[in-house]
Structure formats: structure tokens, C-alpha cells
């Protein structure tokens, strides 16, 4: 197989962790080719634009991108490049797995759950936002559509079916937000009825937060609207040991962009000590998306194998190694398996 993907190295620690990630991917020898394109501060410096059209065209052409974190400049009227990319390609599903890696600082063992967050509507639209002239009143709108709800819930159930997962929890607040969350829940029930082999559980968002902290093992796949999904997926990242191990995929029908959940970490950029695992786990999601799930599992096994090796892993995992020694150890593990 030969498949070309668009690669955005990103800002800050981006180039360091991307380099390590691509070295590990190359070891799989699955015929992946890379087209390197720029976005963010790097693109601003080289072509005078934060999101050059060549980058957008590359993503559109290859339909799959692996992306390092982008620094969003403060001020300048640019909201967020990530939000912009999601809008451009209608990347409606934000898929964030939270899986415990034994040997890390995770609070629980054996967690394996996935949050599927609606990524294009809900409370995060900029339409209809009003701040009164005296600054004493602010108003915003929440938009939920049947189409938006249906495609995200269907995505979650299809994912559960594909991965042999048993349960989907629909997280909502329909008891209070009767119209918006109410519509989401109604549509979710209709979709769930088409997947009789998968258990559908309904849970109110505040209770979900408590349940996640008290008994996370009861969850398998969670599907929810934009704002709730944003909060819940970070909570889940915390359950499995934090940002260094949290990947995310942004998936639409025309394109998919895979990235780490964390940002460009300016405080450690250039020091060679960033943990490459979040980006590498995002690359595993990408491999699964490309039909290469067995190879993705090989990489995840290598991570499980190496994470306890304090002399090889990065300081955020309590190690004395660096980005390169971490990648070297992962490559050694792949060669030995
Ligand atoms: P951050 O995630 O970059 O850093 C938070 C803390 O976690 C820092 O102490 C950092 O050193 C540490 N950290 C993050 N990733 C790490 C890794 N791989 N290994 C070891 N330590 C790691 O969040 P922050 O500082 O709020 O944002 C910095 C910049 O990143 C901002 O410009 C922000 O807009 C951008 N950002 C971009 C994202 C993206 O492109 N998807 C997501 C989040 C933030
Ligand atoms: Mg967030």
C-alpha cells in the first residue's frame, strides 16, 4: 500500500514530536508518504499567512492529515486555527480515546473509553452572540440540528460496532435544556434503536462527571454535544494520566485531521524533552482510519512496553530520557516484537 498524508509539523514542540512520531511510523514500513505543509506561526513566518491555501489544498487532496500543535497568536482577530480547520472541512466528529497505559501516573487502571464529541454546532457557534452596549448583559445561542445530532450519534454507534464495543452513553441535559439537549436526546434514541446489539444508556451531564470520577470503568463510548464533550473529554484525559497521552481525531466526510490534545508547550519547546506519545497515539487513530488497525495496535503495544523504562522516557512521565531516547526505545520495541 502507498498512501500520502498531509503533515503539519506545527509550532513549539510540534517539530520535535512530529519527527519522533514519523520515525516510529516509518518503522512500520506500511508505505506511508508525507507531504509537508505549514500552518500557524511557521506559515506566518514563511508565507505571511497563518493558514496558507497550499495547506488547505493538501489536506483536501490527501483527505488525511497529521498535525502538530499550532500556536494561536493572541490578538490579531484570529480566533483559533483549529476551529478554522474544523469549519473548513466540516470535521463534525471529535474522537478522543482515553486508555490507561500501565506504569504512568494514571488514577485508575484498565480504563478504555472513547468520547465522541459533536464538533460543529452546540454552544460554540459565534452566531447570535450579543454583548449589550453597557456591557451588563451577554447573550448567546445554542444551535442543535437533527442532521448534526444524527450524524454524530450514528458515528458513535458505528464506531462501537466496528470496535466490538458494547455500550454507548448519550450524555445530555434535556431535563433543563429541553429544546436543544432535548432534540439531541430524541434523535439519539431514534438512532440507537437501529443498533439493537449495542446497549444505549442515557445520562445527565453533571451526573456523568461524578460517575466518571467514581466509577469510570462503567463507560465504553460516550457521545455528546460540543460543550459537554469538550469538558468531559478533558476530564477523561485526566483519568488516564493527563495531556502527554491524550490523542484526538477530527473527522468529517471529506477529510480527517489527527492531532494531540495538548498545545505547542512553549515552556519546553526546543529542549528536546517533549513527550511524543499523544501525537503518536493520534497517529495510531490515523492508522485505524486508513484500515491499518493491526499496525496501530503494534505501536500501542510498544508504548505500553516502553513507558515504564524511566531511563528512556521523558520527564513528564517521571523519566530521565528525552524525546529522541523515547522514540529510539519505541523503535527497539517494534523491532523486537
Ligand atoms: P499546552 O498544552 O501547550 O501546555 C500545557 C502544559 O503541558 C505545559 O506545561 C507544557 O509544557 C505541558 N505539555 C504539553 N504537551 C506536552 C508534551 N507533549 N510533553 C510534555 N509536556 C507537555 O497548553 P498551553 O500552554 O495552554 O498552550 C500553548 C499554545 O498551544 C497556545 O498558543 C495554544 O493556543 C496552543 N494550543 C494548541 C492546540 C492545538 O493545536 N490543538 C491545543 C491547545 C493549545
Ligand atoms: Mg478543550
Image (cartoon, rainbow, N blue to C red):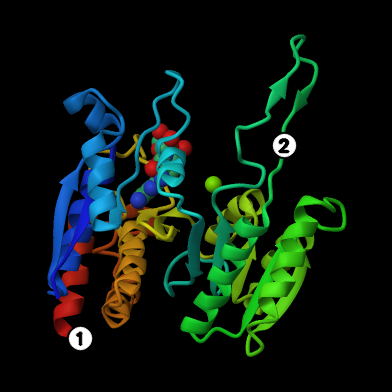
- What label does residue 141 carry, if any? 2
**What's the residue at 23%, 22% (across, down)?**
48
Mark 1 crowd level (few <14, some 14–19, many ≥20, 10 Å Cα): few
- What label does residue 293 carry, if any? none
* Quadrant in which the N terminus is drawn: bottom left
Q: Is residue 321 above or below residue 161?
A: above
In the visual, does 176 lie left or right of 239? right
Q: Position of residue 245 (x, y in %)?
A: 41, 61
Residue that mark 1 sits on: 337
In the visual, does 179 lie left or right of 14? right
Q: Quadrant of residue 298?
A: bottom left
The residue furthest front is 147
- Whether residue 159 is visible to the viewer of this picture, yes or no, is yes
Q: Position of residue 275 (x, y in %)?
A: 31, 54
The residue furthest bottom is 197
Q: Is residue 223 above or below residue 288?
A: above
Count numbered badges in the picture: 2
Q: Is residue 63 above or below residue 220?
A: above
Amino acid at each position: 500500500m502507498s498512501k500520502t498524508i498531509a503533515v503539519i509539523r506545527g509550532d513549539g514542540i510540534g517539530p520535535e514530536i512530529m519527527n519522533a512520531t514519523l520515525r516510529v511510523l516509518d518503522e512500520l514500513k506500511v508505505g506511508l508518504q508525507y507531504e509537508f505543509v505549514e500552518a500557524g506561526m511557521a506559515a506566518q513566518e514563511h508565507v505571511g499567512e497563518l493558514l496558507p491555501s497550499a495547506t488547505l489544498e493538501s489536506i483536501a487532496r490527501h483527505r488525511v492529515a497529521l498535525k502538530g500543535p499550532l500556536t494561536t497568536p493572541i490578538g490579531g482577530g484570529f480566533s483559533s486555527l483549529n476551529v478554522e480547520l474544523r469549519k473548513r472541512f466540516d470535521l463534525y466528529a471529535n474522537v478522543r480515546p482515553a486508555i490507561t497505559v500501565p506504569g504512568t501516573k494514571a488514577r485508575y487502571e484498565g480504563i478504555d473509553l472513547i468520547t465522541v464529541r459533536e464538533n460543529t454546532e452546540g454552544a460554540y457557534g459565534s452566531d447570535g452572540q450579543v454583548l449589550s452596549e453597557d456591557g451588563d448583559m451577554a447573550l448567546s445561542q445554542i444551535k442543535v440540528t437533527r442532521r448534526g445530532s444524527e450524524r454524530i450519534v450514528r458515528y458513535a454507534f458505528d464506531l462501537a460496532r466496528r470496535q466490538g464495543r458494547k455500550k454507548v452513553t448519550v450524555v445530555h441535559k434535556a431535563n433543563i435544556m429541553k429544546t436543544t439537549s432535548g432534540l439531541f436526546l430524541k434523535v439519539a434514541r431514534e438512532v440507537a434503536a437501529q443498533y439493537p446489539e449495542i446497549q444505549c444508556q442515557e445520562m445527565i451531564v453533571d451526573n456523568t462527571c461524578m460517575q466518571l470520577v467514581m466509577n469510570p470503568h462503567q463507560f465504553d463510548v460516550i457521545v455528546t454535544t460540543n460543550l459537554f464533550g469538550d469538558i468531559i473529554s478533558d476530564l477523561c484525559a485526566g483519568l488516564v494520566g493527563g495531556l502527554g497521552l491524550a490523542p484526538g481525531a477530527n473527522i468529517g466526510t471529506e477529510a480527517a485531521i489527527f492531532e494531540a490534545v495538548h498545545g505547542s508547550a512553549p515552556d519546553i519547546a526546543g529542549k528536546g524533552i517533549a513527550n511524543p506519545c499523544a501525537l503518536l497515539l493520534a497517529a495510531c487513530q490515523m492508522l485505524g482510519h486508513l484500515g491499518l488497525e493491526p499496525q496501530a495496535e503494534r505501536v500501542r503495544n510498544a508504548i505500553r512496553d516502553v513507558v515504564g523504562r524511566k531511563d528512556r522516557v521523558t520527564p513528564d512521565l517521571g523519566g530521565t530520557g528525552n524525546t529522541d531516547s523515547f522514540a529510539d526505545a519505541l523503535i527497539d520495541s517494534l523491532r523486537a516484537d
